[in-house]
Amino acid sequence: MAVLRILISLAVVAMFIQLSMAANYTVGGTNGGWDTSTDLQSWASSQSFQVGDNLIFQYIASHDVLEVSKADYDSCQSTRAVQSFSDGNTVIPLSSPGKRYFICGTVGHCSQGMKVEITTLATSSPPSISPATSPTATPLSPANPPDSSVTPSTSPAPEISAPSPEESPKSAPTLSPTSSSDSPQSSPLPSFDVPSTSLPPSGSSPQLPPSSATKCGFETTLTMGFSFGLLILLCL
């Protein structure tokens, strides 16, 4: 939007500059006019008309202004006029470059030299300012591979936390069966498998220490076994 406003402002400024530079030309000059006594052709050839200028025809009621074609200008034909004026103070804007032809429509005046050919030159246009273009992102395609120097960011692997002692499986020591015998004296006390505290082999994860619940279960089992052994001894 800012670029558009700048362009519009430049166009308005250029228009005002063109209007301020536009010139008004009174046909025939200060010492003549639109009449049969002025050398209109010599006056027109001494001027330099440009787009934006104005021609001012000042004349009395016995004259008029007709704009005609080149052929009618040469033959002083006034019946096929492009446009005609008879207000006594006619202003003709020169809005485009090229040649234009004017004669007086009163009988005999054109042949007496009351005619003028106007050559309008194009004005030099100010340099145009192209609007600034914002850079556009080029979509990735097989022809435009991504830059290999940019290393894609990788998210770190999720950490796997070791199970807490409360989450470790509770393993109670197993009670080995006693050997059956006929003699009560030969009955040995029940043996208990005590968990091994040896170091784990290399490469394996270290074994977590037994939890408080495991210790409590071990003590309960040991007490029950000892009581069972005492009960057997009492029964003998």
Image: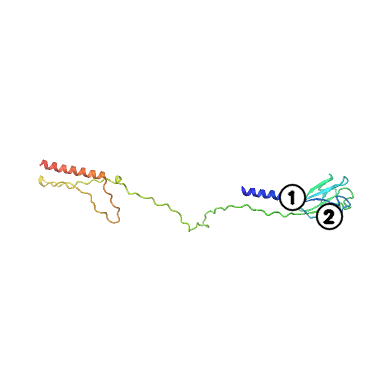
Q: Quadrant of the C terminus?
A: top left
Q: In the rendered image, which residue does mark 1 sit on?
A: 20
Is residue 66 left or right of 154 when viewed as pictured? right
In this view, the residue farthest toward the bottom is: 149
What SS does tag 2 mark? helix
Q: Residues within 10 Å of mark 2 (few under 14, many from 20)?
A: some
Foreground mark, 1 or 2, reads: 1
- The one nearer the camera, 184 or 60, is 60
Q: Is residue 80 visible?
A: no
Q: Residues within 10 Å of mark 1 (few under 14, many from 20)?
A: few
What SS does tag 1 mark? helix
Percent of width and height locating residue 168? 29, 46
Percent of width and height locating residue 226? 16, 43
Q: Earlier in the sequence, mark 1 or mark 2?
A: 1
Task: Confirm or deny contact between disc 1 and disc 2 (CB under 8 A).
Answer: no
- The one nearer the camera, 175 or 27, is 27
Residue at 62% from the left image edge and 48% from the top image edge: 2
Is residue 153 left or right of 233 when viewed as pictured? right
Q: Is residue 75 visible?
A: yes
Q: Disc 2 marks which amino acid? A: Trp
Residue at 21% from the left image edge and 44% from the top image edge: 219
Percent of width and height locating residue 206? 29, 52
Q: In the rendered image, which residue does mark 2 sit on?
A: 43
